[in-house]
Image (cartoon, rainbow, N blue to C red):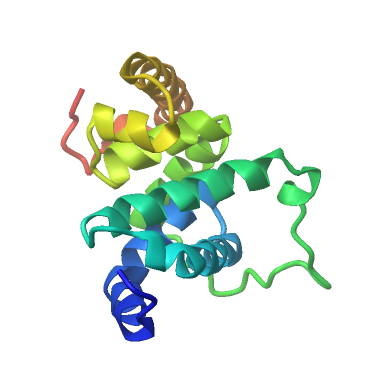
Amino acid sequence: MGRDVSEFSDFVVARWRAMLRTAYLLTGYHGHAEDLVQTTLAKCFVAWPRLRARKAADAYVRKTMLNTYLSWRRKKSWHEIASDAPPDREGADSTEGLAQRSDVMAALAELPPRQRAVVVLRFFDDLGVDQVADQMGCSAGSVKRQTSVALSKLRHALGEITDAVGEESLVGGKGRR
């Protein structure tokens, strides 16, 4: 692919929401997610001419995003969120769906970066074990192990929440076990 700005722009327009969703699930904050996507796109724009096949663009961008995320997580300043004043919490929506989402995001945030990345790639981006292994530069067995450990931690964390609020409220009142 040549350095065709319109082709890159078309790719960004088509994939923006998916990239932002993945970045949000990795980082847990909208501001960090937007920064991650922008940094990823800046890196990918420079490398765009080297992509040989259009089909490789998604995988290349996802791998660049993952590597950038893992690199950012190694920095000490990653967890700092600058703010002049605490966020205004007035009018917060307390619907059940938001509570569940908040619980899942909190549990996801407790995972180490690589386990979180495996969960996001496997279950939110719907990639197979081999695809995740390729993206993360590790073996399929490592992906399976990290997935197993991460899901166990998530079940434990969400199980504590379930015990605290009652299972029916978390599974929509159907009593699924």
In what quadrant of the picture does the N terminus appear? bottom left
Residue 29 visible from this viewpoint: yes
Residue 99 visible from this viewpoint: no
Position of residue 56 in the picture relative to residue 91 (left or right)? left
In what quadrant of the picture does the C terminus appear? top left
Please provide percent x and percent y for residue 55: 21, 57
Residue with the most extreme bottom position: 6
Please provide percent x and percent y for residue 101: 40, 50
Q: Which residue is at the front of the view, 113 or 85?
A: 113
- Quadrant of residue 94 within the rendered picture: bottom left
Q: Is residue 158 above or below residue 58?
A: above
Position of residue 34 in the picture relative to residue 158 (left or right)? right
Q: Is residue 160 above or below residue 54?
A: above
Q: Which residue is at the front of the view, 131 or 120?
A: 131
Name which residue lies at 48% across and 67% down: 41
Q: Is residue 65 above or below residue 17?
A: above
Name which residue lies at 51% across and 61% down: 40
